[in-house]
């Protein structure tokens, strides 16, 4: 395969998602025919990554409209609002989900007929998807300006095409630097428990031919201390007004090591990941996921029966550990609060 | 099962090891009938944990003597020295291996007949095994003096009965505190890539009924920052004279987080883990293991074909990140160098 990776596609009134649960051993499409399929796909991480979740949710609203199109307007709206609530609650941490649903919901409040609303919802979802790709390219450009020639870059989780519609956030910056001819090298954290680094980032890097090595999350600290990492690029699932950033579990740990050893630590995320309603990361709900993510890998049990598990999916990196936040509107430097508020 | 876990047993001129590669789903014995089996068992991690490796190596020398017992003395010694070299090179980092082989080798340099040497080697290996259990109980006592009532303890890798002959080093301290009636709680790092925490520590904790939760290594940092961890107990594979300690990959990362958030970080290891011949951790050889440990879990491939891997098995925690070193001869405080030299 050597065409741009695109995580999702809406055609024939269905949403086709690359099934990210089975990559890289299988490349399969998961087809959402109704909004409940979308709820499942987000909750079960068929699709993951804050921007990709947002766009998927938007198409979920379109699928709901297709389902309820024949209802009288009033009932249509009742059902649509219910569908929006359900999709909105499919996962709690990534704010892009709530942002996309909110944006789609604005189209429900007018005098249009259900058929007109459906048409507008479809256009809006397409817009959100198109904007995502443009946003990522823009972040790639800004981010690339920070990447030295011959840089060795550490990544965590998957922040690539699969986490977005195309191209990626933090991995989009890697793509931009590579396309720019920079002789870069990537160390990719495997990112337990869901192994998005091993399964998805490694797959994207191999597809692109970007020189890279996969490591256990435990190996990152020594590389950082030993001066083998020039910079760290991570994504975000929600950014508070003060710059505190929720991202995949393990990001906070990396940020502490980076700060201790003076390695630049960049968060790469679209402004849709900023939650202007929360002042600090303390207000971010951290999703706890199934213990099976820890006790089983690909259906194979690794831990003993009867062991309890604590499995938070995200952690919060405090603003003081972040060097800068790379958005499609530019690179946000400190003081974060002052500069983030300007973006509202 | 509710008898003390014992990682190895020598009987009928064979060494019976609990096969730690298949725990906890299978409880099987791996039988070493000759010293090459021992070399394989150590290299392939049938048995692991610095003290357990040392005792296994000692019995490997006994098995070599059994193999070569009928040779004339001169040839016997040639073969025995070759066997010692081979076992000695089975893994590079844990110094207990070299220590045990060196101790066994002293019995080769005398006027005894091969049969007399065999007898002495057997007695010496038994002594090393017995001493290990006593040493662990002693470390447990010293360590327990540092454990507050209701302490929540974080562990990394497996440092229990399976890493030793019985009882354990860092997990031996946990056992001692639990036996003492302290109302403790353990968070166990799963410890990628080999998952000794998920597979072995979790199994020992369930066997003992010690309240515990298993976590991804990535989740430890947030628990530490949020004040949920009272202290961290880890083992060691080699300790330099200045206190720098090599241990399972990921230990160094924990130590940085612990230092940043002022959580006590204890290394628990017998004095046989101290390498008096090296001044600092810079001189410790760090084993790199197969990329398959990262790309496959229990035979199931998780990463794409063609991704390169960097897989160091250990890292070095600098002495400044260590609160104290708990040995069978007492608790070593700072200045480590001064206090470690006294133990020689």
Image (spheres, coloured by chain):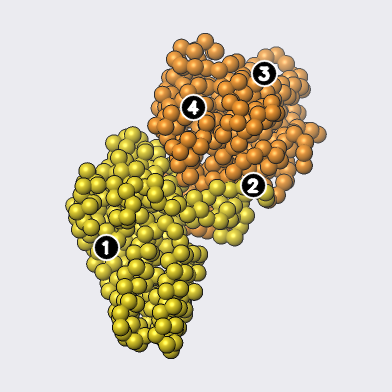
Chain colours: A yellow, B orange
Foreground of the two, B339 or B312? B339
The answer to whether residue B139 is seen in the rendering is: no
The answer to whether residue B145 is seen in the rendering is: yes
Q: Residues within 10 Å of mark 4 (few under 14, many from 20)?
A: some
Chain-order first, disc 4 or disc 3: 3
Q: Which residue is under mark 3?
A: B107
Secondary structure type for disc 3: helix
Foreground of the two, A326 or B139? A326
Dot 2 and dot 3 within a common chain: no
Which image quarter is the C terminus of chain B in?
Answer: top right
Residue A275 appears left or right of A60: left
- B70 over A306 or under it: above or below: above
Which of discs 1 and 4 lies nearer the camera? The answer is 4
Which of discs 1 and 3 lies nearer the camera? The answer is 1
Residue B239 appears left or right of B256: right
Residue sitting at x 74%, y 21%: B123
Tell me the quarter of the picture where residue B261 sits.
top left
Residue sitting at x 39%, y 46%: A282
Instruction: Give how far apart the Cα atoms at labels 4 and 3 are.
Output: 42 Å
Residue B18 appears left or right of B246: right
Q: Position of residue A311 (x, y in %)?
A: 52, 50
Instruction: Give how far apart the Cα atoms at labels 2 and 1 are.
Output: 41 Å
Q: Position of residue A22 (x, y in %)?
A: 50, 65
Q: Which residue is under mark 4?
A: B264
Q: Which residue is under mark 1?
A: A136
Q: Which residue is under mark 2?
A: A307
Secondary structure type for disc 2: loop
């Amino acid at each position: 395969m050597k065409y741009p990776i695109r995580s999702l596609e809406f055609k024939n009134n269905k949403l086709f998602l690359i099934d990210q649960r089975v990559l890289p051993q299988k490349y399969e499409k998961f087809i959402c025919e109704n909004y409940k399929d979308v709820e499942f796909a987000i909750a079960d991480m068929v699709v993951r990554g804050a921007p990709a979740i947002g766009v998927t949710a938007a198409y979920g609203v379109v699928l709901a409209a297709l389902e309820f199109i024949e209802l009288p307007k009033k009932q249509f709206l009742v059902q649509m609002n219910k569908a929006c609530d359900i999709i909105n609650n499919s996962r709690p941490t990534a704010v892009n989900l709530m942002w996309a649903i909110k944006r789609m919901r604005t189209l429900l409040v007018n005098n249009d007929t259900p058929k007109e609303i459906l048409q507008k919802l479809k256009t809006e979802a397409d817009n959100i998807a198109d904007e995502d790709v443009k946003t990522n390219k823009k972040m790639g450009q800004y981010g690339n300006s920070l990447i030295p020639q011959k840089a060795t870059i550490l990544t965590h989780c998957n922040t690539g095409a699969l986490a977005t519609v195309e191209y990626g956030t933090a991995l989009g910056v890697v793509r931009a630097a590579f396309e720019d001819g920079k002789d870069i090298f990537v160390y990719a954290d495997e990112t337990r428990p869901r192994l998005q680094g091993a399964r998805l980032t490694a797959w994207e890097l191999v597809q692109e031919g970007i020189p890279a090595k996969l490591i256990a999350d435990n190996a990152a600290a020594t590389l950082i201390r030993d001066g083998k990492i020039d910079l760290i690029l991570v994504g975000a699932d929600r950014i508070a007004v003060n710059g505190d950033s929720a991202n995949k579990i393990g990001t906070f740990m990396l940020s502490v090591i980076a700060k201790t050893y003076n390695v630049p630590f960049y968060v790469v995320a679209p402004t849709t990941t900023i939650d202007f309603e929360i002042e600090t990361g303390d207000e971010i709900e951290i999703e706890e996921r199934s213990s099976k993510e820890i006790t089983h890998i690909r259906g194979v049990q690794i831990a003993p029966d009867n062991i309890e598990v604590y499995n938070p999916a995200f952690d919060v990196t405090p603003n003081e550990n972040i060097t800068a936040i790379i958005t499609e509107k530019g690179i946000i430097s400190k003081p974060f609060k002052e500069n983030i508020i300007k973006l509202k």
